[in-house]
Amino acid sequence: MIEAIERGDVEQVARYTSVLPAWLQVEWYARFLHNITDDDHRRHALKLAADVGLDTNTITATVVTNIRLSSSNRDPEGQVLAETTAEDRVKINAIDWLLYDKRQRTEALRQANALMRSFLVSRKIGATRVLFNKIPSDSVNIVVQEHEEETGSPDLSGETENIVREYFCIKTFLDAQESFTDWFDHYHQKRPVAPEKPSVGVSFPQEVAYEQASKQHQGELDRWKQTLKLITKTACERLYNVLLFPEGGWLVDSGLDDQEPDTTGVGGDEELMPESLEPDRKHQLSVLRSIYIPQVASLLQNILHSTESFKEALQLADIIASEKHQLYKAFGTCELQRFLVKLQETSLELLDRNCDALGYPLQ
């Protein structure tokens, strides 16, 4: 059988594997599929496996888990690499194994969520977005439909509901990041440059040319401001969507918002690998909240201060301090200090504009 695997003889590998005990069938055929990357070859290998009675769903889930956990996102010196690597792309493409059969869409979302968590912990926003875009947009509908066909009820189980919820949390974050990038690019890179005013005593044609250029610049500036207003509105809404994510908060499981984060190192929702080899999901969620909630608040402060929405920028402190949302729990000491320094800058700006520190006009 090893010789057949080394030759890549799919027919023989499938036939030999089918006579092994069930648990060895999954292990050995998953090993065989590990390095198959061509889509047609993958489909052919799965068809042959199904023809000889192998459990293709468990096998493909095992393949993806093995590839996803095969190594880390660190370089030889142990430093976190933020750029997308060739290894990341292999892991991303492994998710395709779970997209051939709609009945595996829940597993595809679960595995994709786990991989996106690991990317986000390593600040790999680009890799996260590539993986998210690989998941078909109708996946949640398929999950609900498959569940309803199987159980007769549209109400998802608690575990599946949290898989879907996590998927939407990641989507909300990626949308917010994209909108902030659009805002930053428009605000800092696309503002029209005013024409240089001519010196005293220039010729009449030069004065006329300057006046025409000034009028053109004013028109461009008005359009820039109008576009900025729209982009700012979208970016702020999407950043608020992260901070004010409903029913417990961003990356908080539904129905578990009153529980303390699990930091014991016990495995989370992974089933196909030994718990000791899987990252602790609850701990990862807690870490991601501590990384990205302060970051999102900072981005929102940046937009509101830059667009002179000073009063709203100050009101952001009420949202962070609110017991309803408890966002302050995601802030470390340094992040909280930076947040307060920015608030101080906004308050001083208001004082310079004859308003009190809370944004109300002085009498």
Image (cartoon, rainbow, N blue to C red):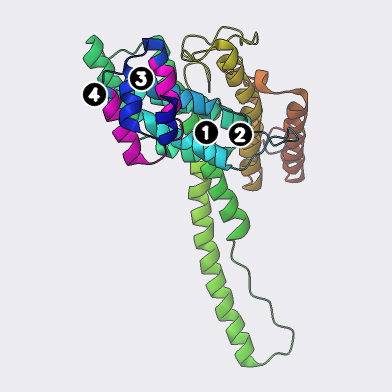
Between marks 2 and 1, how big is the CA–CA gap?
9 Å
Q: Horizontal placement of 104 versus 169: left or right? A: left
Query: Mark 4: which amino acid?
Result: Asp
Q: Earlier in the sequence, mark 3 or mark 2?
A: 3
Tag 1 or tag 2, which sits nearer the N-term? 1
Would you call the spot at circle 1 few (<14 residues within 10 Å), some (14-19), or many (20 or more)? many
Identify whether 348 is placed above or below 323.
Answer: below
For disc 4, the neighbor class at 10 Å (few under 14, some 14 to 19, many from 20) is few
Q: State which region is magenta.
A: 25-49
What amino acid is found at the position of numbered circle 2 in the picture? Val
Mark seen at residue 17: 3
Q: Earlier in the sequence, mark 1 or mark 3?
A: 3
Comparing 298 with 41, the one in front is 41
Work out whether mark 3 precedes mark 4 in sequence or the reverse, and give the earlier one.
3
Q: Amino acid at mark 3?
A: Thr
Of the two numbered discs 4 and 2 in the rendering, the one whose residue sits closer to the viewer: 4
Can the viewer see residue 194? yes
Q: Secondary structure at mark 4?
A: helix
Dot 2 and dot 1 residues touching (CB under 8 Å): yes
Mark 3 crowd level (few <14, some 14–19, many ≥20, 10 Å Cα) = many
Residue 221 appears at what percent x and percent y?
A: 55, 64
